[in-house]
Image: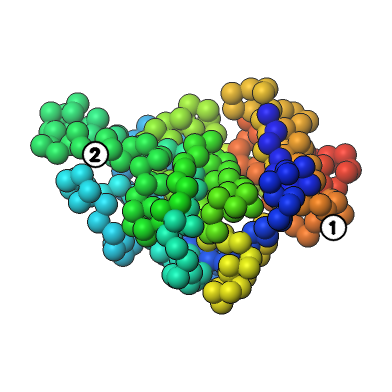
Amino acid sequence: MTDVHDRAVRPDTAARPRTVVVCGVGAVTAQGEGAAALWEGIRAGHSAIGPVTGMPMDGYGTAIGGEVPPLSRPAYDYLAAFGGSEREPAVDFALTAAAEALRQAGLAELPAERWGVAFGSCNGGLRSAEKLARRSREGTTLPDDALHYLLVPPQAIAEALSAAFALKGPALSVNTACASGAHAIAHAAEAIAAGRADAMLAGGSDAFTETAFAGFTSLQSLSAKPAAPYSKDRDGLSLGEGAGMLVLAEESVARAAGAPVLAEVLGYGLSADGYHATAPHPEGEGAARAIRGALKAAGITPGTSATSTATAPAPPRTTPPSPTRCAPRSARPPRRPP
């Protein structure tokens, strides 16, 4: 299925087009707390993949990953809402990244009812569920353990974000595996373009879970050394945890408030291969449809696109080489790396 944001065919937006801009960014990654730490780590060529220390790692295909270092505690006490006592890292990551993005945007005067949240997560608060299950099996259950199941669904993190920052517009969660955060941004842009909100907090968060490492081990996809996705000698992927959040706003609202305008969201495309449980179509058909949909929505051609991103994290048995995924952009046949 492909869902394309195209203002040219949307009667409700064609009458009064609303330009969506990015005016705040926040990040929590293995490089450290904050978008600046991420950027500086990238510029320095620093790999933040190392031994995972926050949970048992016996029996998996690797013992390394991009683990987030200790963070300052978010100001919002989401545990008080239900009487819990044990924090969920995916919630903490999201709150920390969101606070940074909101500080940069500086849209404090915007009415709360015109603010929304679009949040994406692959596993939500699954780490909390794993801890509860382990304690139950070992007979060490705590009196308030059952309350912490409230942190497991991805929507719980969207609700925590809404409550933490008093955002009273649309609030939704997206659970579409590794694309969850990107899909959340697309839905946030749609809400603003359609006039349902003037600003949206959008992005995603995930923490390491035993389930994720077990799943990718069963797929034989994990590398015992830091991943090198574009190397001809690549032998698998490295998992990472963290959060990335953006503040999207209608352009006139952002400029009237003096918010920084960092980028414009031109369009997006969504698709599915309908091919295999884990492997993409060998010719990249689903990815091609999503790329073409995004270009059409943005009103641009492949030749005018300045950048392109690709994924090639795993061995060839599960993921084709990145040129296959990017071929629609260049309109040239794919070529295998040397």
> Which amino acid lies under the numbered mark 2 shown in the image of this protein?
His
Q: Position of residue 229 (x, y in %)?
A: 64, 46
Q: Are the residues at dot 1 and dot 2 in contact (C-beta closer than 8 Å)?
A: no
Q: Quadrant of the C terminus?
A: top right
Cα distance, mark 1 to mark 2?
49 Å
Label of residue 172 in the image: none
Q: Is residue 87 above or below residue 283?
A: below
Q: Nearer the viewer, residue 90 or 257?
A: 257
Element under label 1?
A: helix
Q: Is residue 143 above or below residue 301?
A: above
Judge whether residue 232 can be spotted in this image. Answer: no
Q: Position of residue 292 (x, y in %)?
A: 79, 42
Judge whether residue 303 can be spotted in this image. Answer: yes
Q: In the rendered image, which residue does mark 1 sit on?
A: 304
Q: Which residue is rendered at x = 46% and y = 41% of the image?
A: 173
Q: Which residue is rendered at x = 74% and y = 28% of the image?
A: 282
Q: Earlier in the sequence, mark 1 or mark 2?
A: 2
Q: Is residue 45 above or below residue 291?
A: below
Label of residue 148 in the image: 2
